[in-house]
Image (cartoon, helix red, strand yellow):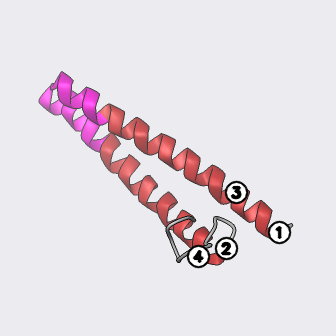
Amino acid sequence: MPGIGGPGSTDTGAEGQAALRLHAKICLVAGILSAFVTVLFAVVLGSLVGTVVLGAVTLGCVAWGIRTRQRLRRGRAAGRS
């Protein structure tokens, strides 16, 4: 992964794969927490603005997770060939 593990580090290297796995775990936790807080704002507090903002954060976490999983799969496939 560029910027992780020094110059020349890529998604296919061991350090890049480890970084992507860490990013996937962080994304999972962030997505679950932001979804919980979104529901909290919507149901308990009734705040439309908070719900919309945290809903956008949740969607960002989902998009980040999908992108990370794609890069992880691509890196593994490139590492095998």
Mark 2, residue position: 13
**Whether residue 46 is situated above or below residue 60 in the rendered picture:** above
Mark 1, residue position: 80
Nearest the viewer among 57 and 39 is 57
Mark 4 and mark 3 lie on one chain; the one further toward the N terminus is 4
Please, what secondary structure does the residue beneath circle 2 have? loop
* Kind of residue at badge 3: Arg
Mark 3 and mark 2 lie on one chain; the one further toward the N terminus is 2
Which residue extends farthest right?
81
* Gap in angstroms between the C-alphas marked 1 and 2: 11 Å
Mark 1 and mark 4 lie on one chain; the one further toward the N terminus is 4
Asked whether the residues under the numbered discs 4 and 3 touch, taking CB atoms below 8 Å apart as contact, a structural biologist would say no
* Gap in angstroms between the C-alphas marked 2 and 4: 5 Å
Percent across and percent down for residue 41 are 19, 33
Asked whether the residues under the numbered discs 2 and 4 touch, taking CB atoms below 8 Å apart as contact, a structural biologist would say yes
* Gap in angstroms between the C-alphas marked 4 and 3: 15 Å
Which residue extends farthest front?
7
For residue 4, say whether it is visible. Answer: yes
Q: Going 19% across and 31% down the picture, which residue do you hit?
A: 50
Percent across and percent down for residue 30 are 36, 52
- Magenta stretch in the rendered image: 36-54
Q: Going 57% across and 65% down the picture, which residue do you hit?
A: 1
* Residue 29 colored in magenta in the image: no
Please, what secondary structure does the residue beneath circle 4 have? helix
Nearest the viewer among 10 and 56 is 10
* Kind of residue at badge 1: Arg
For the residue carrying disc 2, how many other residues have a C-alpha within 10 Å: few (<14), some (14-19), or many (20+)?
Answer: some
For the residue carrying disc 1, how many other residues have a C-alpha within 10 Å: few (<14), some (14-19), or many (20+)?
Answer: few
The C terminus appears in which quarter of the rendering? bottom right
Q: Which label was assigned to residue 15? A: 4
**Whether residue 81 is situated above or below residue 49 in the rendered picture:** below
Please, what secondary structure does the residue beneath circle 1 have? helix
